[in-house]
Image: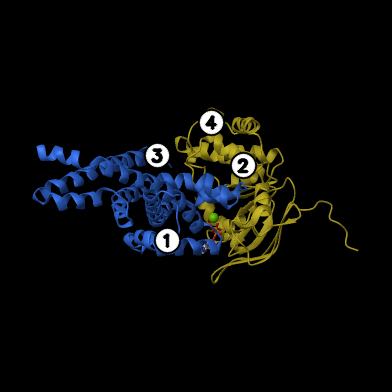
Chain colours: A blue, B yellow
C-alpha cells in the first residue's frame, strides 16, 4: 500500500491522465467537425465532393495512427517546419491533436453516414419538395436525425479515440503510456501493479462514455 | 398567325419521356392542367403515375420533353429549381413529416427557411392552416404522436404554407386506416372547392366524382384515356380502362 501511494507521489499519474483527457477532448471536437463536413461531402449530389470525401476516408481509415502521429513530429515539424505553437511541448501536443483529429474524422464520417442510412428517403424528398436545396435540407432535416441515429457508433469512435490518445507518446507528448514506460523501468518489481493502475484508470474514463452513449441513443432516438 | 390561347396552362407537359434502364416509364406524355382544375390520375400499379407526379416537381429527372409550371421551364438544378419547387406543393403517400420537428415547426420551416418569412408571421400562417385542416390543437406534438390521418392533414398544411400554385398528391390516403380516409379526402375536397389547382393520384372514386374536373387513365407509361369523372366511370372507352375499372369495382 505504501508503494502504491508513493507511486502517486513520485510520478504525476493524474497529470498524465489529464493529458490524455485533453488530447481526447480537443481531437473529439476537431474530428466531429471535420467528420461532419466529410459526411456532408459524401452525401452531396456533387460528384467531385463525393470523390474527395471518399478518398479522404479511404486514405486515413487505412493508415495506422502511429504513422500519422510520427509523421506529425518528424515530417510536419522537423522536415517541413510546421510549427503550431512557440512553446516546444505545446507544439507537439497540438500536432498530436491534429493527427488524432484527421485520423478519427474518417471514422466519425462513416459513423454519421451510418446514421444517414437510418433516415428514410422520404425525409429528404419532403425537404426538397418544399423548396430546400441540398445544404439546408441536409443541415436542417437529414443531419439532425442522422446524428441521433449515429449516437452509438459515434460513442464507439469516442471510446477508440480515448484509448488511441496514448499513441500521442509516439509524437513526443507526455501522457500515460509514456509515463507507464518510465515507471516500469524504475519499478520493475511491481510491474503488474503499475499496469493495473493505468488499465483501471482507462476503464474508469471509458465506462461512463459507454453508459452515456447508450443512454443518449435511447433518449434521442427519433420516433417514427 | 397563331392565336394566343385564352388561358395559359398552369402545368404543361410536352412530349415527356423517361426511362428506368430499359423500362420506358413515361412514353411521350402530353398534359395540360389549367388554373383551378382538379385532375385525378388513375391506373394500374406500375403504370407510371408516381413517376409522372414526381417529374412535375423534378424529384425525378426526365430524358426528353419539357415540363412548364406557369409558363416557366423547370430548371435542372440550383436556386431556380428550389424556388420553382416551392410553387408546387407535394403530398406523399407516407406523409413524410419531419420526424424530429414539432407539427408547428413542420409547417413553419418552409416559409421561414425558403421564403425568409419572419418567424412570428410564419407561426400565424401555420396556426391558421393547422386550424383549417383541423389539427391546431396538436401543434406542439411530434409527428409520431399523431394518427395517420392527422399527419396527412399536417402534410397538406405544410405544403399549403408555401402558397403553391399547384398541389400534387400521390395516393394520399392509401397508407391510411379506412376510418381516417374521409377526414383527409374532406380536406382535399374543400381545397378543390377553394379553387386550388390539383393533380391527384388516387383510386378513391368518391373523391374523383365529387371534386375532379377530369380523370386521366394511365397504363404502361401512356395516357390512355381522359374524360370527366362521370363519363370515365360509367362509360370508359378503352379496353384497358374497362378491364381496370372492372377489377377495382370488384372490391
Ligand atoms: N427509382 C426507380 N428505379 C427503377 N425503376 C423504377 C423506379 N421507380 C419506379 N420504377 C418502376 O417504374 C414503373 C412505374 O413506377 P411508378 O411508381 O411510377 O408506378 P405507379 O403507377 O405509381 O404504381 P403504383 O400504383 O404501384 O404506385 C414501375 O415498373 C416501377 O417498378
Ligand atoms: Mg405510385
Give the labeled residue for mark 2: B113
Q: SS of the residue at dot 2?
A: helix
Q: Nearer the viewer, mark 2 or mark 4?
A: 2
Q: Residue A122 placed where, x, y %?
A: 51, 50
- The residue at 35%/44% (across/down) is A22
Q: Which mark is residue A76?
A: 1
Q: Nearer the viewer, mark 3 or mark 4?
A: 3
Give the labeled residue for mark 4: B139
Q: Residue B30 placed where, x, y %?
A: 70, 62
- The quarter holding residue A224 reads top left
Q: SS of the residue at dot 4?
A: loop
Q: Residue B9 placed where, x, y %?
A: 76, 53
Neighbours of disc 3 within 10 Å: few (<14), some (14-19), many (20+): some
Chain on which label 4 sits: B
Give the labeled residue for mark 3: A220
Q: Determine the CA span between mark 3 and mark 2.
A: 24 Å
Amino acid at each position: 500500500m505504501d508503494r502504491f501511494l508513493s507511486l502517486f507521489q513520485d510520478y504525476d499519474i493524474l497529470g498524465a491522465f489529464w493529458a490524455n483527457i485533453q488530447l481526447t477532448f480537443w481531437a473529439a471536437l476537431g474530428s466531429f467537425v471535420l467528420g461532419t463536413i466529410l459526411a456532408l461531402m459524401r452525401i452531396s449530389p456533387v460528384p467531385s465532393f463525393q470523390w474527395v470525401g471518399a478518398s479522404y476516408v479511404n486514405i486515413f481509415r487505412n493508415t495506422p495512427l502511429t504513422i500519422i502521429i510520427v509523421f506529425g513530429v518528424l515530417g510536419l515539424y522537423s522536415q517541413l517546419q510546421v510549427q503550431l505553437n512557440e512553446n516546444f511541448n505545446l507544439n507537439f501536443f497540438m500536432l498530436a491533436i491534429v493527427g488524432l483529429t484527421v485520423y478519427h474524422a474518417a471514422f466519425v464520417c462513416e459513423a454519421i453516414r451510418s446514421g444517414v442510412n437510418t433516415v428514410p428517403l422520404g425525409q429528404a424528398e419532403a425537404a426538397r419538395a418544399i423548396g430546400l436545396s441540398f445544404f439546408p435540407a441536409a443541415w436542417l432535416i437529414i443531419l439532425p436525425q442522422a446524428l441521433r441515429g449515429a449516437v452509438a457508433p459515434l460513442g464507439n469512435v469516442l471510446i477508440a479515440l480515448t484509448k488511441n490518445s496514448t499513441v500521442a507518446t509516439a509524437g513526443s507528448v507526455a501522457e500515460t503510456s509514456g509515463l507507464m514506460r518510465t515507471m516500469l523501468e524504475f519499478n520493475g518489481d511491481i510491474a503488474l501493479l503499475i499496469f493495473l493502475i493505468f488499465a483501471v484508470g482507462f476503464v474508469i474514463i471509458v465506462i461512463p462514455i459507454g453508459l452515456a452513449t447508450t443512454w443518449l441513443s435511447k433518449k434521442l432516438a427519433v420516433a417514427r | 398567325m397563331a392565336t394566343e390561347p385564352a388561358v395559359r396552362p398552369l402545368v404543361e407537359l410536352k412530349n415527356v419521356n423517361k426511362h428506368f434502364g430499359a423500362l420506358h416509364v413515361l412514353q411521350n406524355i402530353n398534359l395540360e392542367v389549367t388554373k383551378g382544375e382538379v385532375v385525378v390520375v388513375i391506373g394500374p400499379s406500375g403504370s407510371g403515375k408516381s413517376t409522372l407526379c414526381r417529374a412535375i416537381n423534378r424529384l425525378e429527372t426526365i430524358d426528353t420533353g419539357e415540363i412548364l409550371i406557369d409558363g416557366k421551364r423547370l430548371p435542372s438544378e440550383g436556386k431556380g429549381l428550389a424556388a420553382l419547387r416551392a410553387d408546387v406543393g407535394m403530398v406523399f403517400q407516407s406523409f413524410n413529416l419531419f420526424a424530429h420537428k414539432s407539427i408547428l415547426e413542420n409547417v413553419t420551416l418552409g416559409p421561414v427557411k425558403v421564403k425568409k418569412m419572419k418567424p412570428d408571421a410564419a407561426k400565424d400562417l401555420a396556426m391558421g392552416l393547422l386550424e383549417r385542416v383541423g389539427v391546431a390543437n396538436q401543434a406542439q406534438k411530434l409527428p409520431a404522436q399523431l394518427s395517420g390521418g392527422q399527419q396527412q392533414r399536417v402534410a397538406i398544411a405544410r405544403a399549403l404554407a408555401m402558397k403553391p400554385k399547384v398541389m400534387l398528391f400521390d395516393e394520399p390516403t392509401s397508407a391510411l386506416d379506412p376510418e381516417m380516409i374521409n377526414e383527409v379526402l374532406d380536406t382535399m375536397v374543400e381545397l378543390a372547392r377553394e379553387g386550388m389547382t390539383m393533380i391527384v393520384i388516387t383510386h378513391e372514386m368518391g373523391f374523383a366524382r365529387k371534386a375532379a374536373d377530369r380523370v386521366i387513365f394511365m397504363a404502361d407509361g401512356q395516357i390512355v384515356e381522359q374524360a370527366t369523372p362521370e363519363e370515365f366511370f360509367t362509360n370508359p372507352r378503352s379496353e384497358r380502362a374497362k378491364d381496370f375499372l372492372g377489377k377495382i369495382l370488384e372490391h
